[in-house]
């Protein structure tokens, strides 16, 4: 299943190169069952060896994502999400604005992605990406220690990779 929302103390030094390229950031933990989905999607995109596309796979959160984004105009963040509002394996595309209600004051270690991006844009508006999209896969298990994802999430991987590659193509053809 695929859902789409309309898509019209940390070092702040950029990691990687500054470019007009698309950066795909896969987030998750490789040992927490379905939480690995973002890492697996980014890995699949990397194996496609697409021109002008960079990938990183990280087990980070909070403010740690800002240095990864700095210097890139277009970023796709891929991660697991557990809303329990959708079936596991559902792919959802979000804009940063979709998370605006979740922006909160929190410590750097407990800060959610939306809050980190807002701080990054306040701190360095020219360095942060002009376009950010989130591709999230609804998951069912992020608490069990296992390197094996659930069947529904594994089955969603090809569609999730296609969703990310379609966004990359859209980004590369836009001005």
Image: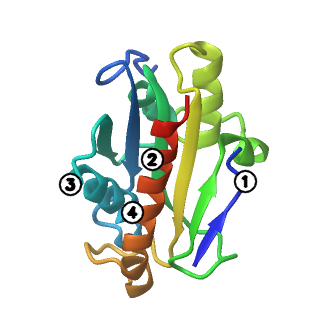
Q: Can residue 143 be seen in this view?
A: no
Residue at which label 3 appears: 47
Q: Where is residue 85 in the image (x, y as percent from the top left)?
A: 70, 76
Residue 51, located in which quarter of the rendered image? Answer: top left
The residue lying toward the viewer, choosing from 39 and 93, is: 93
* Residue 38: image location, x then y, percent: 39, 58
Q: Which of marks 1 and 3 is nearer the N terminus?
A: 1
Q: Residue, x 50% and y 50% (percent of image)?
A: 167
Mark before the other along the chain sequence, 3 or 2: 3
Which residue was labeled with disc 1?
Answer: 6
Marking on residue 161: 4
Q: In this rendering, would 41 be left or right of 69?
A: left
Label 3, label 4: how many angstroms apart (C-alpha)?
11 Å
Task: Write down the residue under mark 2.
Answer: 169
Residue nearest the viewer, comparing 108 with 129: 129
Q: Which of marks 4 and 1 is nearer the N terminus?
A: 1
Pointers 2 and 4 in contact (C-beta within 8 Å): no
């Amino acid at each position: 299943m695929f859902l789409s929302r309309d898509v019209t103390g940390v070092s702040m030094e950029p990691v990687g190169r500054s470019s007009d390229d698309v950066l795909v950031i896969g987030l998750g933990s490789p040992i927490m069952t379905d939480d690995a989905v973002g890492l697996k999607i980014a890995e699949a995109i990397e194996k496609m060896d697409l021109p002008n596309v960079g990938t990183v796979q990280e087990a980070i959160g909070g403010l740690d994502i800002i240095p990864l984004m700095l210097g890139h105009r277009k970023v796709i963040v891929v991660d697991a999400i557990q809303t329990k509002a959708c079936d596991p394996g559902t792919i959802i595309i979000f804009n940063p604005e979709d998370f605006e209600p979740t922006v909160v004051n929190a410590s750097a270690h407990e800060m959610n992605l939306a809050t980190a991006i807002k701080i990054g844009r306040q701190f360095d508006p020219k360095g942060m990406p002009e376009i950010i999209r989130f591709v999230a896969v609804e998951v069912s298990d992020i608490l069990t220690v296992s390197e094996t994802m659930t069947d529904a999430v594994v089955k969603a991987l090809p569609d999730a990779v296609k969703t990310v590659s379609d966004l990359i193509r859209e980004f590369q053809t836009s001005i």
